[in-house]
Image (tube, rainbow, N blue to C red):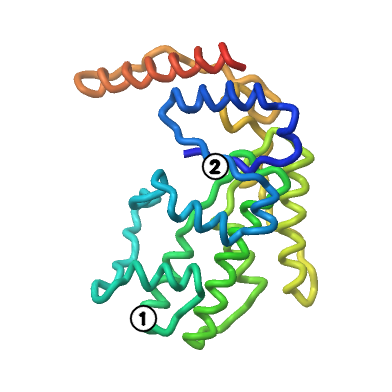
Amino acid sequence: MVIEIDGSSHADKADYDVERDAFLQSLGLTIIHIPVKDVMSNLDGVMQMLFDHPALKGTPPVEGNEPPPTPPKEGKWGERVKRLLKQKEVYELSKEELFHIDALLDRVKICDPAIGSGAFPMGLLQEIFSIKELIAYETGKEWNPAETKLNIIQNSIYGVDIEKGAVDIARLRFWLSLVVDEEKPKPLPNLDYKIVVGDSLISNKFDGEIVEIDWERKQSVGKADEYVKNVQRLLKRSFRKAEAIF
């Protein structure tokens, strides 16, 4: 799944976008293009479109070894959560359920592979923040706006862009979002490994240095040997396709 926010920089890159989309689709990926003007003027509509998109249905993989909180079983849990996310309605949810949702929000991971100036993750930051604020109000939980935003930025937001200027602007926007809620502005935490400069599609560079890919198979036996050879074959095929296009 690739979600791309298209700004004015795409106006003269129609042919490039078509070739890139064809390459990504050949890898079995679904591409969703969203005009940046829609994100800025109709974020709720964009969120609804993504929420209803068939490619985004299902349960995301769990990161790490910690099991996710067990959701409540009684009632139409999914419908009540949907109303909380879309209409900010909480009257059908118990305090325990709200605490459960709050814990799940802490596990959200967002990566924008073409972050640009950060419009899309900034919108999601505000969306998560507003839901957490509502939950804190309804449950009586201590509320610290700056700390909540900082936790979301540190634990949930990731991004890549090929333009260094765009990455710098995105980092600045996150810092400004924190400043408005702080009595005394603090430095933005180190985001060098969370919002980075790079080609999220295909690249053999890291921090300006060429990274040689070692295609030689390491020692393995049996089923593991067969698996490794198959992965290397797929990587080589994808790399050749990328070279032909880019």
Question: Helix, strand or loop at disc 2?
Answer: strand
Q: Give the numbered dot on residue 3.
A: 2
Q: Position of residue 54 (x, y in %)?
A: 39, 46
Q: Quick check: can you spot residue 154?
A: yes
Mark found first going from the N terminus, 2 or 1: 2
Quarter of the image with the C terminus is top right
Q: Position of residue 26 (x, y in %)?
A: 44, 23
The residue identified by callout 1 is 96
Q: Answer with the quarter of the image where residue 74 lies.
A: bottom left
Foreground label between 2 and 1: 2
Task: Specify few, some or many for label 1: CA neighbours under 10 Å numbering under 14, 14-19, or 20 or more.
Answer: few
Relative to 192, does residue 188 appear above or below in the rendering?
below
Of the residues shown, which amino acid type is indicated by label 1? Glu
Question: Helix, strand or loop at disc 1?
Answer: helix
Q: Residue at x 67, y 71 (%)?
A: 146
Of the residues shown, which amino acid type is indicated by label 2? Ile
Q: Residue at x 45, y 60 (%)?
A: 107
Q: Nearer the viewer, residue 153 or 49?
A: 49
